[in-house]
Amino acid sequence: MECGANTEKFFISDFSIGHRGAALQFPEHTEISYRAAARMGAGIIECDVTFTMDKELVCRHSQCDLHTTTDVVTRPELNAKCTTPWSPGVAPRCCASDFTLEEIKTLCAKMDSANDIGAETAEGYAFGGTADFRTDLYQTECESVLTHKESIEIILSVGAKFTPELKEPAVEMPFDGFTQADFAQKLIDELVEYNVPPANVWQQSAVEADIRYWIENTDYGDQAVALDFGDSRPRSEDYDWLLAVQATGAKYVAPPMWKLVEANPAAGDAGELDMVASEMAIAAKDLGFEIVTWTLDRTGVSLGSMSPAYYWQTLMGQGLGLTEGSRFELLYVLDKKVGIRGIFDDWPAVTTFYANCMSKLLRVN
């Protein structure tokens, strides 16, 4: 193939995954971010699924992030409905479950930001604190908060596939009679409503009960993805976690990138890479799992000085001289050495460039 030809139509459906769209430059979970991800070659796009007060499904990175991802605190009548309303010096908490879908659809999505509770005005809180590796350049329009159904329509329109994540509820379940099983089933029901084939869906959850539910009760269980959010779990217990997932019948696991790679003690020898597959990665493949990982391009500009170095933590401080170009070495190790099926990328052009222009040219030994 000719590298770079028709990249907006070339989908790497088994490798590049648009994580919440193109969240480095566009407000996450908006139509513009999903379309940007598709144009950059993401073949699978994620809606993080949570629910509203009236139990409708919407795309939000967490159930309680409206205060950092929308302008809700600037709307006095809606700010008052937040679990913790904003006021000067108070850290707000505004949840999708605080509002009806009709109310949420009046909000404007914006770039996620770590906002200043010392701001004197609601606008100062809402629109401050954007990370330096993101931009507010494209916040000139009022982008709507998407429903899960709207995300399905957009993803279908760009010819991509689906990896919705059922977000763990931040409210006590059942919620007004809405059970966890109801939540898991409603996600599937909406995919069925749009005739989305199970083969085109990799639905995710960090909740073991969700994985079991999908496998035992729906036609969408074969590609259910068990997310690994066990950051505090000792690495010595990773194998036990994999066995527990295997017992559910799941065939896919999704640990963060840092759990799948480690510094190569033989680095520096002729031809040796600086990083290699971790023990967990090797164990997962030995147990027959397919592996998805997350998230490339969720780091600061300088890998060498990034703090905290969450996504690279097993490689930091190892004298590897990490640079921006190290992303491609990491992709190579994850692709050729770990054997991942997909990787989430907040700026999918990086993974698409690797998949289109580098993957088939690089050594496999």
Image: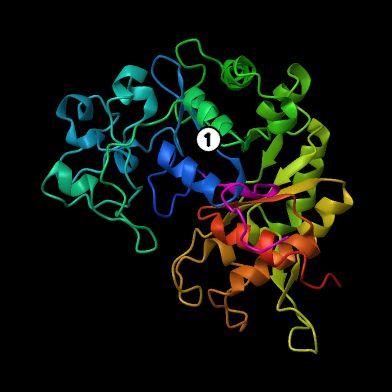
Q: Quadrant of the C terminus?
A: bottom right
Q: What is the three-letter code of the residue carrying label 1?
A: Cys
User: Is there any visible trace of residue 166 in the rendered image?
Assistant: no
Q: Residue at x 27, y 40 (%)?
A: 141
Q: Residue at x 79, y 31 (%)?
A: 248
Neighbourhood count class around disc 1 (C-alpha, 10 Å): few under 14, some 14–19, many 20 upward: many
Instruction: Left or right? Give the position of 64 relative to 338.
Output: left
| Residue 51 spot, x, y in % from top left | 46, 23
Q: Main secondary structure of the magenta part?
A: loop
Magenta stretch?
Answer: 1-19
Instruction: Left or right? Give the position of 113 relative to 354.
Output: left
Instruction: Left or right? Give the position of 267 relative to 52.
Output: right
Residue lying furthest left in this view? 120
The answer to whether 204 is drawn above or below residue 118 in the figure is above
> Total label count?
1
Q: Quadrant of the N terminus?
A: bottom right
The answer to whether 262 is drawn above or below residue 226 in the figure is below
| Residue 309 spot, x, y in % from top left | 51, 66
Let me know if residue 13 is in the magenta part.
yes
Instruction: Left or right? Give the position of 102 relative to 250.
Output: left
Viewer-closest of 226 and 242: 226
Q: Residue at x 80, y 38 (%)?
A: 251
Q: How is the image coloured?
A: rainbow
Provide the residue designation for mark 1: 47
Viewer-closest of 10 and 119: 10
| Residue 176 spot, x, y in % from top left | 45, 12
| Residue 155 spot, x, y in % from top left | 55, 33
The answer to whether 35 is drawn above or below residue 50 in the figure is below
